Image (cartoon, rainbow, N blue to C red):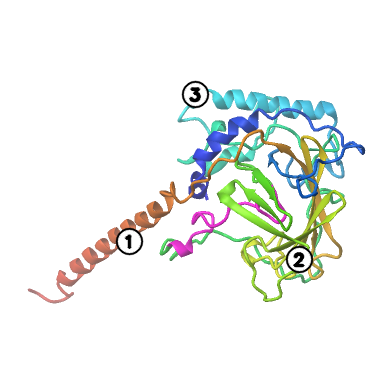
Amino acid sequence: MRLALALALGTALATSGLAQAQTTPAPAASAQYKAPRTSFGQPDLQRVWSNASLTPLTRPPALGEKLTYSEDEVKKMEDAVLVEIAEGDAPTDPNASATFVAKGTVERPEFKAAGGAVGGYNRGWLDPGNNVMRVNGEGRTSVLTTPNGQFPPRKPGAAVTPAPQMPAGSGAFDSYERRSAGERCIVSFGRNGGPPMLANGFYNNNYQIVQTPDFVTIVVEMNHDARIVKLNAKHRTDEIRPYFGDSIGWWDGDTLVVETTNIPQSQQFAGSWKNLKVTERFKRSAEDRLYYSFSVEDPTMWEKPWGGEYEFHPLGAPLFEYACHEGNHALPGILSGERVLEAEAAAEAAKAAAAKSTKPAKGKKN
């Protein structure tokens, strides 16, 4: 996975400083706010947005059913990030631990990438978010809005599809087809593109929304993914499952509703894919906020729908090119490296076989 992560370093470096500058807290939504309109009359969602934040998908278990942080708690968490950035900008000791523990705070797991080996990143390469995510001005403890902020229990006997894993063991490096879609620059290795659309905790959590009268396209910076939403259309019936599923949308007042089915197995969510339906809602809640919520349904997996919500904030800059293939030295590197190891193993085997064939048989004399 660290090899796949390395593919986007150039873009991450260019964008992380911009995202770090985003420190303004989210305002409370105003009932009087009216989104601007496009030239063809739709609420205008078009902008470059980011969903990077300190708020995790699931709530820390110790917080129980606590939905929001106090302002003092928010300040403490966001102040700790300033320490983190300052330490991250300092010269790196090559013999130091890959872990990071800011003074008085808990360890941030995203800074343990590669376990301290070559490829582990320091702060300058990352954009995990500097602010607690807010909804309607309230600092949230999790993106999920279930009572305890965790994934809900599944039905007894529900067939769970495990998350895609990197191949391991014999044959893992036989071909590029054995490597992940992220390493192959096909789609991102996180859930940035969705559905649901979730920050990955590392970088490239940026999106550009483009609207026409009949389509809405969400360009995802991570691995140049693009979700195309057909407006006022029907779902396909041919059982084809494209990347990001089959998304159709419609306007409910000022809210864009997007319903996605036909999600491929490789992009399962929480163990569900075949009967998974994700409904997302996008609405401008302020001049510099885009409200986003998602609802997850699978009657074979859960008793009732569940989901989460957050607010996008403006990136304040255009998306940079995610030149994945152009800089993809990792894939040929790991494949050619494995060929070298195979050649060395074959040479050793041939050497051992030759030595065995020339050794006199037991009990015989030359």
CA separation in Å, label 2 and label 1: 52 Å
Q: Residue at x 46, y 30 (%)?
A: 95
Q: Which residue is mark 1?
A: 342
Q: Which residue is mark 2?
A: 233
Looking at the image, tell me whether mark 3 or mark 2 is earlier in sequence order: 3
Q: Residue at x 65, y 56 (%)?
A: 227
Residue 250 belongs to the span the image colors magenta: no
Left or right position of 121 against 127:
left
Q: Which residues are magenta?
A: 176-198
Which is more foreground, mark 3 or mark 1?
3
Q: Position of residue 253 (x, y in %)?
A: 87, 51
Q: Residue at x 60, y 61 (%)?
A: 164
Question: In the rendered image of this protein, does residue 361 appear above or below residue 249?
Answer: below
Q: Position of residue 232 (x, y in %)?
A: 78, 63
Q: Nearer the viewer, residue 141 or 253?
A: 253
Look at label 3 and name its amino acid. Answer: Pro
Q: Residue at x 58, y 24 (%)?
A: 87
Q: Nearer the viewer, residue 135 or 206?
A: 206
Mark 1 surroundings within 10 Å by alpha-carbon count, few (fewer than 14), some (14 through 19), many (20 or more): few
CA separation in Å, label 3 and label 2: 54 Å
Looking at the rendered structure, the secondary structure element under dot 1 is: helix
Look at label 2 and name its amino acid. Answer: Ala
